[in-house]
Image (tube, rainbow, N blue to C red):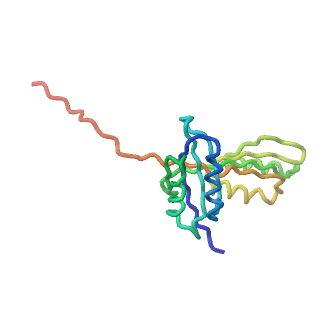
Amino acid sequence: MSRRTLHTLSVLVENRAGVLARVAGLFARRGYNIESLAVAPTDDDRFSRITVVVDVELTPIEQMVKQLNKLVNVVKITELEPRASIERELCMVTLSVDRDRRNEVLELAQIFEARILAVAHTAMTVSLEGEPDKIDDFEELVRPFGIIELQRTGRIALAKLERSPARSRSTNKAKAS
């Protein structure tokens, strides 16, 4: 099985009714496959940020960007390179767990820094935030317990901060004679 080629786009749009529908409609009309889609207002309530993870196996990313740029409410599009960005996702999962195996789930939760949200006699709900690969690994490890319900938010991402060396100040003082 070939591995899909996924790219993350951060699309800054005007925070207006119907913008998300137009963006999603563009992807649907063009047959672009969306792996993940998350949208929320930014710190400036005039704008929202849409983080979309797309499969570029059949359509070049450049073509998607050109089409998005044609939409009136799109302000800026940034392709976030995996090595130059920080990606996170949230997952909540309800597992079928009897008393005898509850400690196994607690151990996994501790290893993955997950939180136990609810406990019942035969089930537990766990929440986990992290990189998408971490979420995938956790999901794979808890699957044998029996997943009753699972919800993932989809990725959100921001560019990493640039790190430049701190400028050193000259600390040499003029010597008094």
Rendering coords of residue 42 (x, y %): 56, 39
Q: Tell me the quadrant of the picture where the N terminus can be found.
A: bottom right
Quick one: 30 or 103, which is closer to the camera?
30
> Looking at the image, is 83 positioned above or below residue 39?
below
Q: Quadrant of residue 49?
A: top right
Q: Looking at this view, name the residue that lies furthest to the right.
A: 121
Q: Tell me the quadrant of the picture where the C terminus can be found.
A: top left
Q: Quadrant of residue 25?
A: bottom right
Quick one: 18 or 128, which is closer to the camera?
18
> Looking at the image, is 10 positioned above or below residue 62?
above
Rendering coords of residue 74 (x, y %): 53, 48
Rendering coords of residue 137 (x, y %): 68, 58
Task: Name the residue rendered at 60%, 54% in the picture.
Answer: 52
Q: Looking at this view, name the residue that lies furthest to the left.
A: 177
Task: Name the residue rendered at 24%, 33% in the picture.
Answer: 171
Quick one: 72 or 55, which is closer to the camera?
72
Q: Looking at this view, name the residue that lies furthest to the bottom.
A: 1
Q: Is residue 82 left or right of residue 136?
A: left
Task: Name the residue rendered at 87%, 43% in the picture.
Answer: 120
> Looking at the image, is 166 positioned above or below residue 177?
below
Q: Disc count in the image?
A: 0
Rendering coords of residue 156 (x, y %): 60, 49
